[in-house]
Amino acid sequence: MSKARILYVSQHMVPFLPETPMSALSRFLPQGAHDKGREIRVFMPRFGKINERRHQLHEVIRLSGMNLSIDDVDHPLIIKVASIPTARMQVYFIDNDDLFKRKAVLYDADDKLFPDTDVRSIFFVRGVLETVRKLGWAPDVIHCHGWMANLLPLYLKTNYADDPYFANSKVVCSIYDEGYKGSLNKRMSEKVALDGISEDHANTIKKATFDNMNAIGIEHSDAIIVGSDELNEATMDKIKSAGVPVLDFPGNDGYLADINAFYDEVLGVESEATT
């Protein structure tokens, strides 16, 4: 199914942020899918640490201007875009001055998580889904990278379950060991509930630890990719008991072919991926 539409939702990506296993794969996997004839869209947060001038980010006026209400507070959604010339690939950025303007990614000057990180995560995934609707683009596969993106399967399977743009979308989560210590805001599940998501669906993040943010993604995904070779035992047990297709850690060699073939498996079509 070479023409399948793949939506990539990534927490971090090179060259916009420093290289990690997740940010590198988030950069090269969409390019590999595009080279195999897939139609792709790529989204990430516009963290204030990203140099807009160097990477030539500019606002997409026709996509900006929507307000997203979280915990009864309106947050204007700004959409920016930049190109990676060597890959012929565009990246869309979810932005908001209050949530993402600070010149850091996740931690303040005292090396503590920003207290509104839960709101930033909710805003990010809702911003992606609303922008894709505005683009009029219906993805076949939505591939999430990073714990900040792991709320997307929850929203997709609840609030957006009957949306015509996502009715046939399969959501794949890559689960990584790149996380944080402690918990996000203790009211995170309440804020999700204000969006109309039931307490049962949000129960896992009543305590929003890194492991539980991974778990909420696993619980609502159609397929899972083991993104790191050393996930903790509890997370691996959660993945094994999820009852959905799982791709074991594909390693650094041949992962493009392995993951593209996995997309076809998830979509129930004969794979055309080649090495």
Image (cartoon, rainbow, N blue to C red):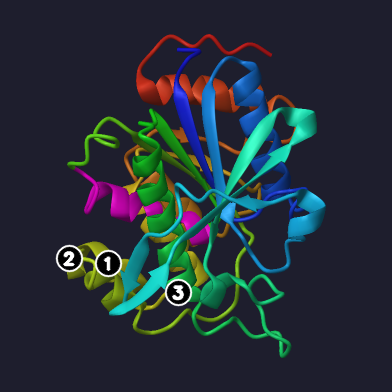
**Left or right: 67 with respect to 110?**
left
**Left or right: 271 with respect to 194?**
right
Residue at image point 45% right, 12% down: 1
Q: Element type at marker 1?
A: helix
> Which residue matches tag 2?
198
Occupied quadrant, residue 257? top right
Nearer the N terminus, badge 1 or badge 3?
A: 3
Q: Is residue 199 above or below residue 15?
A: below
Amino acid at dot 3: Asp
Quarter placement of the C terminus: top right
Amino acid at dot 2: Ser
Please give the range of residues in magenta.
147-161
Q: How many marks?
A: 3
Q: Element type at marker 2?
A: loop
Q: Around disc 2, counting alpha carbons within 10 Å, would you say few (fewer than 14), some (14 to 19), or many (20 or more)?
A: some
Q: Is residue 32 above or below residue 95?
A: above
